[in-house]
Image (cartoon, grey):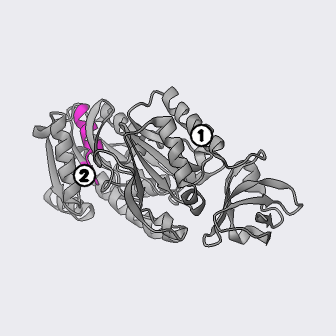
Amino acid sequence: MPYKVFLKKNEEKRLLAGHSWVYANEVARIEGKDTNGSLAEVYDAKDRLLGKGYINHASKILVRVFIRDGGEADKRLFLSRIHAANDYRVKLGYADCYRAVFAEADNLPALIVDKYGDTLSVQFLSLGMEKQKEMITECLREVFAPVGIYERDDSPARTKEGLPLVKDWIVKGPETRVKVTENGLSMIVDLENGQKTGYFLDQKENRYALRRYVRDADVLDCFCNSGGFSLNALAGGATRVTAVDISEQALSDARENAGMNGFSNRLETVCADVFELLRDYKKQGRSFDAIVLDPPAFCKSAAEAEDAYRGYKDINLLAMKLVRQGGFLATSSCSHFMSFYMFEKMLAEAARESGRTVRSVEIRSQSADHPSLLAAEETRYLKFYVLNIQ
């Protein structure tokens, strides 16, 4: 008999608004008996059916609802939703390098599918999706006809679901280093060792937006990773870019990508801790026309938000002091625990303490292939601000 999950009074409001998560502490009782990871029905306190989703007793997110119309979690449903998700991206003009399925935002909770050229990189971030891996793989082959499908399941989110960490081919492809085109630039994406599923796709359109602010500029790109912002700055007419990362492998990738686009003579790479380097630059009297801050998430839980706030403020304050008068600071946060309100408040405090006059020029979020649900603030996580420093 399938599980039936009954919510406490008034705990259905988020689900009715369109969110998919049911937390264990919102549940009054569970009836029925089935295997963990199976499809469970979710009811409100008045026994009204709200929807169905995969259950995991080992997770704080007990159920992830994705069926609300009485349908079944069969191949036809998955195929239809993957087609719909990809059709949305194709309609917007995405072709070579984009997120094809974005979990909750595409009504397929905990499933990530990124397309890099003819190869897919995927994540199964819940027990329910893990148990459907074979069937989902069949759907992906039908929709995309990829030359390979790489599983990049080394995310800590898997651990919270009681799942092992995995990096391996599901469908063997020719190689894990894939050449793609982003914003007209050639790049190598390392599916096995790159960040996330191989690359930070969510900043794609923000990288392009940077170009208008860096013509004839001396640019400092902090936490450069494989050089996405650096390449776009150079394509936008920057005279020189200093790309900084603590990973020598990331810098090697950035140099390779710069060489593929004919930018090697305008790119300098520095292997260093960004916080320490910015302080050293301040002591040396160094300054730049534009600085990019694209750090990793400083907080991955609400409990870490206060410490993260101080970290973001510290690094943004340092950067503001290093930007030449009239120059620009492009700064971002990829943690949803650092809200837009908190991030802007932090920037205002940093601006005040820097002694500079700081104007907000542009406020952006993640690329359109990462749509966010208004009912699920967790899906709108990326903040990208362009500031003019006077």
Was residue 228 drawn as part of the magenta stretch in this picture? yes
Q: Residues within 10 Å of mark 1 (few under 14, many from 20)?
A: some
Mark 1, residue position: 79
In this rendering, position of residue 227 left or right of residue 83: left
Name the mark nearer the viewer: 1 or 2: 1
Q: Amino acid at mark 2?
A: Leu
Q: Give the secondary structure at mark 2.
A: helix
Label 2 Cα crowd, 10 Å radius (few <14 / some 14-19 / many 20+):
many
Q: Residue at x 45, y 27 (%)?
A: 93
Magenta span covers which residues? 221-235
Residue sitting at 53 percent across and 69 percent down?
Answer: 160
- Which residue is disc 2 drawn over? 322
Return the x and y of residue 385 as percentages of the image width and height: 42, 45
Which comes sooner in the sequence, label 1 or label 2?
Answer: 1
* Residue 289 visible in rendering: yes
Say which quadrant the C terminus sits in: top left
User: Is 386 in front, or is 388?
Assistant: 386
